[in-house]
């Protein structure tokens, strides 16, 4: 029961949404792009989009500051 | 306190706006302007023809020699415009033309150049008022560039000049007044004004305003340093912008590299620019509609998205504190750690309550990011202005991060530190990073109270830090203050020369490269950012590259080639802002709603296209995103070539201290033991059995060998990608490709450097490549 997050193996949690995963990973930066198996997930759908076992999740943090 | 300042309690102003009434006023004094003015004697005067800006360029450079009191114009040729674009590009080119390679920071020949850029002064898009300045840095003795908002650069251009070149040294305190209203430049003595910036900039704003009105004061820009700049290598330039809502002359800072130190060494007390006025057409864009449409689109993004993204409009760059803490990147106790249990005490939520909200807070007209936050009515607790009520600009992330680095977790203290650094003219970054190093040395007994001339510089001792600042500003001549105020590199040399402590420990812990202190991010777990810092042209500042998320978190650039590509693209792209006169924050601190669906979201492609649109609209010819990169790559390589010219542009100059790469001490290792143990197993190939038999010291040693090997391979890949030799020299072939075929002196200098490296056997890869390892290039003479 694993998924990959940014190409690193992470345990899959049944019923976990994108929002839950971000919390679990402590990804608190607001400027992130999330893709599941290459499909972009809208920010408004983070809390309603489940992550299936075996998914490849990309959480791309954009850069801030100058 | 000078006699020229009279107590006047009524000038602390209560103003009702935004969220309610607040007290403002930088000072509870009024200034006897007539008395101050009476000390001014005009030493030199130059009259120039007033001409409008044409398609983003004034077309002239103003040269002022402070030794000879010479003032003249240098025409801006089309060749220089094409090859160097503007901003720091002009500063570098003028420095190359007018100065020798052996010039040191305090030689009269040293040039301090303040530059605008072709997009600078635009008001239809956010962040278009940056001043880009260059000089030989006291910290590094190579060229340091630094940028700041405020009104000086646009006013310089609207007065008639793209750049101001200052050379020579005055015999007494002087100021240079560029009067765009009368077409006149004067060098004037300025004996009576304050030196510290919050008072000096206020005095000169009132003195040089054409009349006693808020509107007139907005048309004056002042550049100043402070007493700290006179007495340290961390001098900054404060660029003023008059804030009519607060009725305060506020300031933005050229922070890095000691520009203020050079300024005061030249006996410059201030620069003043005054204009009659300007509007959205003063920069003479060819197609105003194109620019306006692009600006409106971007402004809508800011309005709709900032509150969901970075909250720049309410807390400025301070929003990063909690983010860095969460990702183990917030420097704590001289970068030993990246997070701390007390860090929430200095999160942006704490500063939000202190910042006056509801006021547009841009440092140039038309900026909707408006991140120049300020705390009004702050009562100082220490120093020469103790008890006075002031407006504190910022603090920005780096300053708050500096507090964390010194293990000071107190909002009020950070505000006081920020205020005094600004008015004394001290770089908050270098100051904090250096003090954090001294504190660590204090903890190890390498420094102590006696060696610190009575200061107990232990982690968290905020009062000692403030006392240290006050003693620098007062010109304290004690040995410790004299050495410590010159930064980490000089302190390392001092400690080693005295035989105090293990030289390796001292070298590993002091966070500097090329002599410049690191900015406030922990990069131990990002190889790419280790390169981003240590390979940066001026020294370890994050404005060239901030790749930690891309590398450490996103895992987007796993190979050396990937990292090298990022260390090619981002430094060149981010340098572009410094050649056209812009702030980077509107590029990447606000992101379009559909950015996620683009091919390369990290580059914010829509915003890159916006800049190409604006530049096309101003210049009146089509500019593509690739053109922007080409403009920048020329200047980027020219600066590296100048580093070579000045003796600090080789691989040996790009090596970071180990503290930036991994755990130096056992405490650091043990604080993240699982992380480092796993890396030894997974990356180095040590078996669990072997690991269990290794001491912590052995683990640190093996990890360190691994990380330096990785770093050398990274540098190989980056040099190759940039078209530099394996020893870091831009090749003549590369320079010709960039368009510098006619710059024979430069090409010959580079060829000689390469020949010297050849003779010394230095044109070889730094990494050790075994069978199966991919070297950057098979051709051993690829640069020829």
Image (spheres, coloured by chain):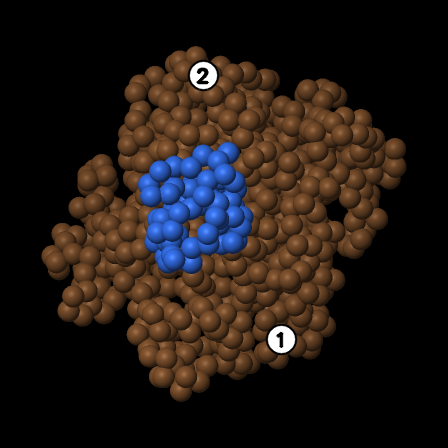
Q: Are marks 1 and 2 in one subunit?
A: yes
* Up/down of B111 relative to B178, above or below: below
**Secondary element type, mark 1:** helix
The answer to which of B621 and B556 lies nearer the viewer is B556
Outermost residue on the front side: it is: A14
Chain bearing tag 1 is: B
**Secondary element type, mark 2:** helix
- Which of the 4 image quarters holds residue B657? bottom left
For label 2, the residue is B293
Q: Residue at x 59, y 78 (%)?
A: B444
Q: Residue at x 80, y 42 (%)?
A: B389
Horizontal side of B570 relative to B524 (left or right) equals left
The answer to which of B673 and A2 lies nearer the viewer is A2
Note the chain letter of the blue one. A
* Up/down of B224 relative to B233, above or below: above
Tag 2 or tag 1, which sits nearer the N-term?
Answer: 2
For label 1, the residue is B443
Residue B669 shows in this picture:
yes
Residue B87 shows in this picture:
no
Q: State the image coordinates of residue B570 (x, y, percent, origin top left).
A: 36, 44
Horizontal side of A11 relative to B207 (left or right) equals left
Q: State the image coordinates of residue B256 (x, y, percent, origin top left).
A: 52, 49
Note the chain letter of the brown one. B
């Amino acid at each position: 029961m694993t998924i990959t997050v940014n190409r690193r193996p992470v345990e899959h949690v049944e019923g976990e949404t994108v929002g839950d995963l971000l919390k679990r990973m402590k990804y608190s930066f607001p400027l992130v792009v999330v893709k599941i198996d290459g499909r972009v997930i809208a920010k408004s759908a983070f809390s309603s989009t489940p992550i299936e076992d075996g998914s490849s999740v990309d959480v791309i943090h954009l850069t801030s500051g100058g | 306190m000078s006699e020229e300042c009279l107590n006047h309690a009524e000038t602390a102003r209560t103003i009702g706006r935004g969220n309610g009434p607040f007290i403002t006023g930088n000072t509870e004094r009024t200034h006897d302007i007539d008395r101050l003015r009476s000390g001014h004697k005009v030493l030199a005067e130059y009259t120039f023809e007033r001409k409008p800006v044409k398609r983003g360029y004034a077309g002239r450079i103003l040269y002022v020699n402070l030794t000879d009191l010479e003032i003249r114009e240098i025409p801006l040729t089309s060749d220089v415009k094409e090859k160097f674009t503007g901003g720091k590009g002009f500063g570098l080119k003028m420095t190359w033309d007018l100065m020798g390679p052996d010039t040191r920071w305090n030689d009269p020949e040293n040039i301090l150049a303040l530059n605008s850029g072709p997009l600078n002064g635009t008001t239809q898009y956010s962040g278009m008022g940056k001043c880009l300045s260059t000089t030989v840095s006291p910290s590094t003795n190579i060229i340091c560039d630094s940028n700041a908002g405020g009104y000086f650069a646009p006013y310089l251009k609207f007065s008639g000049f793209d750049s101001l070149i200052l050379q020579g040294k005055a015999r007494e305190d002087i100021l240079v007044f560029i009067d765009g209203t009368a077409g006149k430049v004067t060098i004037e003595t300025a004996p009576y004004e304050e030196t510290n910036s919050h008072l000096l900039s206020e005095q000169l704003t009132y003195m040089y305003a054409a009349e006693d009105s808020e509107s007139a004061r907005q048309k004056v820009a002042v550049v100043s340093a402070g007493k700290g700049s006179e007495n340290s290598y961390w001098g900054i330039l404060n660029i003023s912008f008059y804030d009519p809502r607060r009725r305060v002359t506020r300031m933005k800072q050229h922070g890095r590299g000691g520009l203020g130190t050079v300024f005061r060494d030249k006996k410059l007390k201030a620069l003043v620019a005054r204009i009659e006025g300007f509007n959205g057409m003063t920069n003479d864009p060819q197609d105003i509609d194109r620019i306006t449409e692009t600006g409106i689109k971007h402004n809508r993004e800011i309005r709709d998205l900032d509150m969901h993204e970075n909250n720049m409009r309410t807390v400025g760059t301070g929003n990063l504190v909690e983010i860095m803490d969460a990702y183990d990147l917030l420097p704590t106790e001289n970068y030993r750690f990246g997070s701390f249990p007390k860090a929430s005490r200095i999160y942006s939520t704490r500063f939000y309550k202190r910042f006056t909200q509801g006021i547009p807070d841009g440092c140039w007209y038309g900026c909707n990011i408006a991140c120049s936050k300020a705390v009004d009515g702050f009562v100082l607790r220490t120093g020469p202005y103790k008890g006075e009520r002031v407006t504190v600009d910022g603090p920005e992330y780096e300053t708050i991060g500096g507090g964390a680095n010194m293990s000071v977790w107190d909002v009020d203290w950070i505000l006081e530190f920020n205020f005094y650094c600004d008015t004394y003219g001290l770089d908050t970054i270098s100051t904090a990073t250096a003090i954090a190093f001294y504190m660590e040395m204090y903890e190890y007994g390498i420094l102590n109270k006696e060696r610190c001339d009575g200061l107990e510089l232990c982690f968290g001792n905020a009062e000692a830090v403030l006392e240290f600042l006050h003693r620098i500003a007062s010109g304290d001549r004690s040995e410790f203050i004299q050495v410590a105020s010159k930064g980490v590199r000089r302190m390392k040399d001092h400690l080693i020369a005295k035989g105090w402590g293990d030289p390796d420990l001292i070298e590993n812990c002091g966070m500097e490269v090329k002599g410049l202190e690191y900015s406030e991010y922990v990069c131990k777990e990002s190889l790419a950012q280790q390169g981003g810092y240590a390979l940066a042209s001026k020294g370890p500042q994050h404005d060239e590259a901030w790749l930690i998320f891309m590398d450490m978190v996103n895992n987007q650039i796993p190979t050396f080639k990937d990292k090298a590509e990022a260390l090619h693209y981002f430094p060149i792209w981010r340098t572009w802002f410094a050649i056209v006169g812009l702030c980077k924050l509107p590029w990447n601190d606000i992101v379009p709603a559909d950015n996620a669906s683009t091919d390369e979201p990290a580059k914010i492609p829509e915003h890159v296209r916006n800049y190409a649109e604006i530049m096309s609209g101003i210049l009146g010819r089509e500019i593509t995103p690739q053109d922007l990169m080409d403009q920048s790559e020329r200047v980027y390589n020219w600066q590296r070539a100048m580093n070579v010219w000045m003796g600090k542009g080789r691989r040996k100059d790009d090596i970071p201290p180990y503290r930036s790469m991994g755990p130096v001490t056992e405490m650091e290792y043990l604080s993240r033991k699982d992380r480092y143990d796993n890396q030894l197993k997974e990356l180095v190939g040590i078996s669990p059995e072997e690991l269990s038999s290794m001491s912590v010291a052995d683990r640190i040693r093996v990890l360190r060998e691994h990380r330096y090997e990785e770093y050398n391979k990274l540098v190989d890949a980056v040099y190759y990608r940039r078209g530099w030799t394996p020893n870091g020299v831009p090749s003549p072939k590369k320079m010709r490709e960039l368009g510098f075929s006619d710059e024979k002196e430069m090409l010959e200098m580079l060829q000689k450097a390469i020949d010297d490296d050849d003779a010394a056997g230095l044109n070889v890869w730094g990494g050790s490549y075994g069978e199966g390892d991919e070297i950057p290039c098979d051709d051993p003479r690829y640069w020829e």
